[in-house]
Image: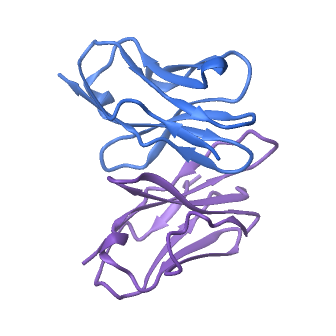
Chain colours: A blue, B purple
Amino acid sequence: AQSVSQHNHHVILSEAASLELGCNYSYGGTVNLFWYVQYPGQHLQLLLKYFSGDPLVKGIKGFEAEFIKSKFSFNLRKPSVQWSDTAEYFCAVQGNNDMRFGAGTRLTVKP
Amino acid sequence: DAGVIQSPRHEVTEMGQEVTLRCKPISGHNSLFWYRQTMMRGLELLIYFNNNVPIDDSGMPEDRFSAKMPNASFSTLKIQPSEPRDSAVYFCASSFRQGGNYGYTFGSGTRLTVV
């Protein structure tokens, strides 16, 4: 069965700090990988996705993620966070059919 | 495109009452998913449909939960009878499944409070 682990439950950063959120998954076959963001009180929005090809994918708002197949990881990064990045971030793995989400990482950016 | 539309946005009901949540997927999408989000359990997949047919309902917590998709443009999630532990935000998502690559679009969710 698919499973997704996000290592950090809550991350607190100051503006301009660099961000890296960890995501590891467990699945026996080919997967598609996603990061979603949920701003307070809002629904999930797609940040970026990996289907195939270049393992370094760039998303919206300066986010990027790197797929490392040997480590079953898909970590999210941003070189310099802003206060407006305060949100919850979900890693998701899609196998043959459905999509499974990690528990989420809450990011708080202090101005 | 109006996106995935869920109604109501908020629902407050008394324990024991029947609750029906509604979802209108994006036109042309052929897969629909119901998720539940709580602080304790995060995002859980409850059930999903492909071409209006339920494929996997193993995430439905109990027989009190049921979901239908009578046509390509409408789905319901019903809880009967509702209990306080059902309080959560319920998200609907849809996608166009073509080959193995497809992403989801989420609705704004229904915040359910059972008192």
Residue, x 65% and y 47% (percent of image)?
A1
Q: Nearer the viewer, residue B111 or A101?
A: A101
User: Position of A24 compared to A31: left or right?
Assistant: left
In the rendered view of the protein, which quadrant contains the C terminus of chain A?
top left
- Give coordinates of residue B102: x percent, y percent: 70, 42
| Residue nearest the viewer, comparing A77 with B95 | A77
Q: Can you give x and y, in whole percent of width and height, for residue A65 in the image? A: 53, 20
- The residue sitting at the right extreme is B99
In this view, A105 is above or below B80: above
Quadrant of the rendered image containing residue B14:
bottom left
In this orientation, does residue B65 appear? Answer: yes
Residue at point 58% right, 66% down?
A: B24
Residue appearing at x 45%, y 18% in the figure? A77
- Up the image or down, B41 lies above or below B20; here it is above
Q: How many marks?
A: 0
- Residue B27 in view, yes or no: no
In the rendered view, does A36 fall on the left or right side of A57? left
Closer to the camera, A26 or B85? A26
**Quarter of the view holding residue A88:** top left
Of all residues shown, which one is farthest toward the left? A111
Q: Residue at x 70, y 42 (%)?
A: A95
Question: Residue A43, percent across and down?
Answer: 42, 49
Question: x, y (%) of residue A86?
Answer: 29, 32
